[in-house]
Image (cartoon, rainbow, N blue to C red):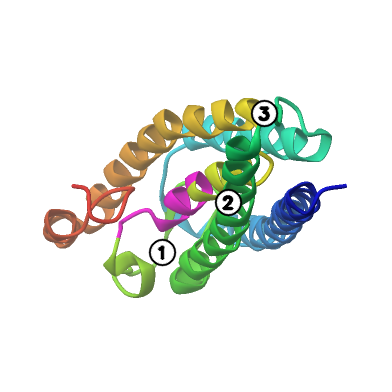
Amino acid sequence: MKLADMLLQAAQVSGRVSALIVFDVLAVFLAVHAGRGLSRRGTAVHANPRSLAGAALTMVLALFVAGCVWWRLGSIPVAGPLVVALIGLCSILGSVMCFMALSFIVWGFLALGPSGHVLARVDRGAKLVTTGPYLLVRHPVYFGIGLLFLGAALAVASWWALVGAVAWWPLALHRARLEDELLRRAFGAEFEEYARRVPGVVPGFK
């Protein structure tokens, strides 16, 4: 086996393992948060039941992308030294993006503290969080999920996973609008001023 082939194989294995680890850790983390949210379900003063469908679709997309990683569905065939180099670089970049995404998502939930929920809601006595990742973007968790899907697609060089990553963004923008409506009702002028300063889903893009 040539050295280039060995390096490519190592990069692909590393990318696949990294993506699967991140999906597993994130699944456990979100399950814990969902359980805590259920224990506080009587404390909501503003809620949007339409967010349940968005959460279900997000889970379906996550399972689809994770399945593409696990079974290596839609992987780009290796042909020629240039493709080998590009796929190897994509695998390394994808691994880094997956761990960055996990950090961003967990950071977003931790910054919210007790206000963090899987579904869109505002609890009694909650305050508008504008610190941590919320200084960069109003919906850091959605940005992190998009980064994870894209990183996973690159990590295993999968066209199918890339389709899942692209499909996420319309859903993310829709959920962001639902949450913005909820926050606008809950916090009024405070949220309006915050929304004028901070981008919605992607840092640096209003």
Please give the residue where the numbered disc 3 appears in the rendered image. Answer: 76
- Residue 28: where, in percent of width, then height? 75, 59
Identity of the amino acid at label 1? Arg
Q: Is residue 81 left or right of residue 6?
A: left
Would you identify the image quadrant in which residue 70 lies?
top right
Residue 151 is at least partly visible in this image: yes
Magenta-tinted stretch: 137-146
Identify the residue shown where x is 33% and y is 69%.
129
**How busy is the neighbourhood of tag 1: few (under 14 within 10 Å), some, or many (20 plus)?**
few
- Residue 198: where, in percent of width, then height? 20, 58
Residue 150 is one of the magenta-drawn residues: no
Q: In the image, which disc is placed on residue 89?
A: 2
**How busy is the neighbourhood of tag 2: few (under 14 within 10 Å), some, or many (20 plus)?**
some
Residue 141 is one of the magenta-drawn residues: yes
Q: Nearer the viewer, residue 202 or 56?
A: 202
Q: Is residue 116 left or right of residue 85?
A: left
Please give the residue where the numbered disc 1 appears in the rendered image. Answer: 124
Query: Is disc 3 placed on a helix, strand or loop?
Result: loop
Identify the residue shown where x is 41% and y is 57%.
140
